[in-house]
């Protein structure tokens, strides 16, 4: 398999140099996802975006990932005097062995403290922790590793639910594909939300998700709760008809079950009432749409099946702790930047 090539040029003052720290056993998707976001942003908006990406390791040269692919890297020492915009450390099966390398963690700390921002994808947070960069900071990682992260670094404030967290210069994300969400959020912070959405669309990414969304989508949570798949077809039908009448009576008919039997067996299988499941699914759909400023809150209420703006408002506050208009006001306005069209 062809290796990724590291760009070994030293940054100029205008460039936003983004370093990805690589070590043996790094997870390929953890690094390739966010790397592609920055590369594609530069490609799509060539005249406005100044990202320069580089893969770096302690000694440089080829580094094996958790797959058959190797990554071509530059030595960390090459950037000892560079102006670094972003330093990212990704996760993988080799992270704990890498975290025991004192020379590596010392270099990460030195470069991170000089960078404008630093961050981790998935279990890369353990390397940040070993580098002394998590003390007193909010951080997340893959949900399976949150307990270990909190135990190993008790001065860190570990949050197990969000897909990514930004605490000052420190950024961190949950597992694998959440690194794409983190990178898109960084692009939005640098160049505005409109640019990030364009990149997400180019990558055929489902949406640009805010960091406080749960690592578990409602679809995944319901699938995990309904382990035997008894109501799988019903959940698919609900997602496809979220704007329609989804009363318990309608769901029972769709499941071809008597009402009381349906309610009892649905709760036994999923741990929640049918009405709560419907509201959860509708809220996930609303969170997608509320990120689009052209769609009014009244339209979202109708399209997601809440009926009225007031009913939508109450449900949104229950789910997020904030009103939908306040949530939308917190979104960063996007500057107008011309997209580069390839010849």
Image (cartoon, rainbow, N blue to C red):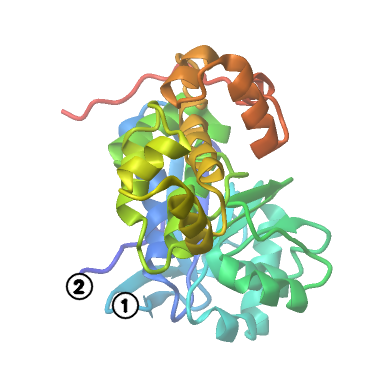
**Looking at the image, can residue 289 be seen?**
yes
Q: Quarter of the image containing the N terminus?
A: bottom left
Q: Identify which residue is drawn at 34% across, 33% down.
A: 241
Q: In the rendered image of this protein, does residue 86 appear above or below residue 290?
A: below
- Residue 40 point in image, percent of width and height: 34, 41
Q: Relative to 90, is 32 on the left or the right?
A: left
Q: Of 269 and 29, which appears nearest the observer?
A: 269
Circle 2 Cα neighbour tier, 10 Å, few/some/many (<14 / 14–19 / ≥20)? few
- The residue where tag 1 is placed is 67
Where disc 2 sits, the SS reads loop
Residue 119, by quadrant, is bottom right
Q: Is residue 11 visible?
A: no
Q: Residues within 10 Å of mark 1 (few under 14, many from 20)?
A: few
Residue 281 drawn above or below residue 142? above
Query: Where, by quadrant of the figure, is residue 121 drawn?
Result: bottom right
Which residue is painted at 59% across and 46% down in the image? 85
Cβ atoms under marks 2 and 1 closer than 8 Å: yes
What is the quadrant of the C terminus in the image? top left
Q: What residue is pinned by disc 2?
A: 1
Identify which residue is drawn at 50% across, 30% down.
286
Classify 86 as above or below 287: below
Distance Cα–Cα, label 2 vs label 1: 10 Å
Left or right: 45 in relation to 305: left
Whole-percent x, y for residue 314 in the image: 67, 26
Q: Which residue is nearer to you in this view: 262 or 246?
A: 262
Query: Foreground residue, 297 or 72?
Result: 297
Give the secondary structure at mark 1.
loop
Q: What mark, if any, has residue 229 been given in the picture? A: none
Q: Earlier in the sequence, mark 2 or mark 1?
A: 2
Q: From the viewer's perspective, is the residue at label 2 or at label 1 nearer?
A: 1
């Amino acid at each position: 398999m062809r290796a990724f090539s590291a760009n070994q040029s030293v940054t100029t003052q205008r460039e936003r140099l983004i370093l990805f720290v690589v070590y043996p056993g790094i997870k390929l998707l953890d690094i390739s996802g966010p790397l592609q976001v920055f590369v594609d942003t530069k490609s799509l908006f060539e005249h406005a975006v100044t990202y320069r990406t580089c893969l770096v390791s302690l000694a440089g040269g080829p580094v094996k990932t958790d797959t058959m692919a190797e990554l071509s890297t530059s030595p960390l020492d090459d950037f000892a005097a560079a102006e670094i915009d972003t330093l990212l450390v990704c996760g993988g099966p080799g992270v704990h062995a890498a975290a025991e390398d004192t020379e590596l963690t010392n270099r990460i700390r030195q470069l991170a403290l000089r960078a404008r921002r630093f961050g981790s994808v998935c279990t890369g947070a353990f390397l940040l922790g070993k580098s002394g960069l998590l003390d007193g900071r909010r951080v997340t990682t893959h949900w399976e590793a949150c307990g270990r992260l909190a135990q190993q670094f008790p001065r860190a404030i570990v949050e197990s639910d969000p897909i990514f967290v930004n605490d000052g210069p420190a950024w961190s994300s949950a597992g694998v594909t959440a690194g794409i969400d983190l990178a898109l959020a960084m692009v939005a912070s640098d160049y505005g939300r409109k640019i990030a959405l364009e990149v997400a669309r180019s990558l055929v990414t489902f949406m640009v998700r805010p960091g406080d969304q749960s690592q578990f989508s409602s679809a995944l949570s319901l699938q995990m709760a309904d382990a035997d798949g008894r109501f799988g077809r019903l959940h698919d039908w609900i997602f496809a008809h979220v704007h329609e009448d989804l009363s318990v009576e309608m769901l029972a008919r769709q499941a071809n079950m008597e009402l009381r039997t349906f309610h009892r067996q649905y709760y036994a299988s999923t741990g929640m009432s049918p009405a709560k499941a419907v509201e959860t699914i509708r809220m996930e759909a609303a969170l997608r749409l509320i990120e689009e400023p052209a769609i009014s809150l009244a339209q979202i209420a109708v399209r997601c099946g809440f009926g009225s703006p007031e009913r939508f408002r109450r449900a949104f506050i229950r789910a997020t702790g904030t009103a939908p208009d306040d949530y939308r006001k917190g979104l960063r306005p996007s500057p107008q930047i011309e997209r580069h069209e390839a010849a």
